[in-house]
Image (cartoon, rainbow, N blue to C red):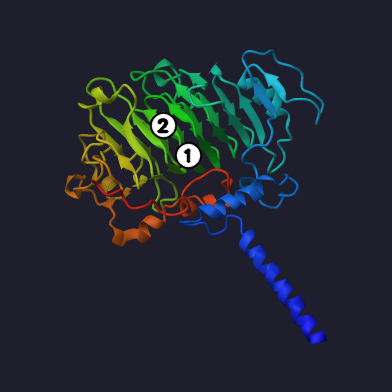
Amino acid sequence: MAAVQQQQRLLALLVLVLLFACGGGGRGGGGDGDSEDRSSSSTMLLIATADDDAGRGRGLRWWPPKTFDAVVDQQQKTVPAPPPGAGPPTTYTTIAEALTKGAGGRNQSEEEPKPYVILIKAGRYEETFNITGKNIFLVGEGIGKTIITGNKSNATGYDTVASATVAAVGDGFVAYNLTIQNTAGPANRQAVALRSKSNKSIVYKCRIEGYEDTLYAENGLQLYVETEIAGKVDFVFGNASAVFHKCSLLVRSPPPGKHNVITAQSCNNTSRDSGFVFQSCHVAADEGHAEKLKSVDTFLGRPHKNFSHVVFMGCDLGDVVNSTGWVPWNKDHVIEDVTSTVTYIEFRNYGPGAASDTRRRVNWTGVQVLTEANVTVAEKYTADRFIDANQWVPAGIPYEHGLPPPPPTAN
């Protein structure tokens, strides 16, 4: 009898272990076809409190935000901060105020401070600012509704770094549901809308809008999801390890006689420890620019540094993309030492700008149009492998864990 009871206890323990393994696995090992598991684990994570989740790490517990720490509303006057835990969040009239007076009052000595979440009400905010604190979240009320805008540029006396409308320097930056723009115009040279030097940063459902050097993905691990990025020359540039998932790269018309380049990635070492990966993205003319772009060459990228590293996979490449695909830094001067050391990869792309006839692509050693036989190479560029996304991206932010599906069959 004692032996039977012992067996029953062991069986019950085994059942509990199995239940925990099936239901409590969280985000470990995500791959193709795990969307159901993602949804259930997301629910579990989102109902946990910060204390309950203290051991999970920042990325797994802070999305979506449950409350706001500050509200920015141009229509209201700034009100005093309520006592801790009492009353509504503090309201400010500018984003800069919310950052300096609100977020600036946090204990910055903490290695992993609790996120400071700022709701920015609909409106046009003519501000430029640096975000130096960690885990600052900017949450808007919609693309084209909450607009943060500036117009600094190289032509008006600012270098590239100083021209940024928003500069995110503190790690853990998140932007959601808003527009960031630089309106300096196509003739004013470098004019950054967003500069991100924030490690483990996320831009989700936003529009980043400018002309030359729109998005400076400077350093660190970065993820962009369902975001529009508009510009003309080198409008996604920098040395970050960044994945762009289901984003729209929207090309604008340059000044007469000029050509467009989407990326200028600046890795400069043989380990290729940084790079840009565009997965399931869409490349097309921005609204109102299609007609002018018919006579303009637009390229996927050019090497800002010798080991420039860019991947397009599973992307819909529109007819704005030139059939040669890639271009030297100086269009009329090919430097073989550079073109042989870059890594420019295309895989499972489709649309009129894709490399359906690889003979039309530039004949550089570093340019590879992968076939299904090279799928193991492409797998290295999934978000979970390239930027360890499953280790820090919140479960509530959707992205593909594995490779994009094969291109749609033409009718």
Instruction: Decide if residue 122 is on the left or right side of residue 367.
Output: right
Residue at 82% over, 85% down = 2
Seen in the image, is 71 located left or right of residue 271?
right
Q: Position of residue 254 (x, y in %)?
A: 29, 23
Give the quadrant of residue 255: top left
Q: Is residue 98 above or below residue 350?
A: above
Q: Secondary structure at mark 1?
A: strand
Q: Residue at x 21, y 40 (%)?
A: 323
Kindly tell me whether residue 17 is visible in this rendering: yes
Residue at the spot 33% in from the left edge and 18% down from the top edge: 187
Q: Position of residue 175 (x, y in %)?
A: 55, 33
Locate residue 211: give its quadrant: top left
Q: Which mark is residue 224?
A: 1
Label placed on residue 229: 2
Mark 1–mark 2 Cα distance, whole angstroms, equals: 10 Å
Comparing 44 with 152, the one in front is 44
**Identity of the amino acid at label 1?**
Tyr
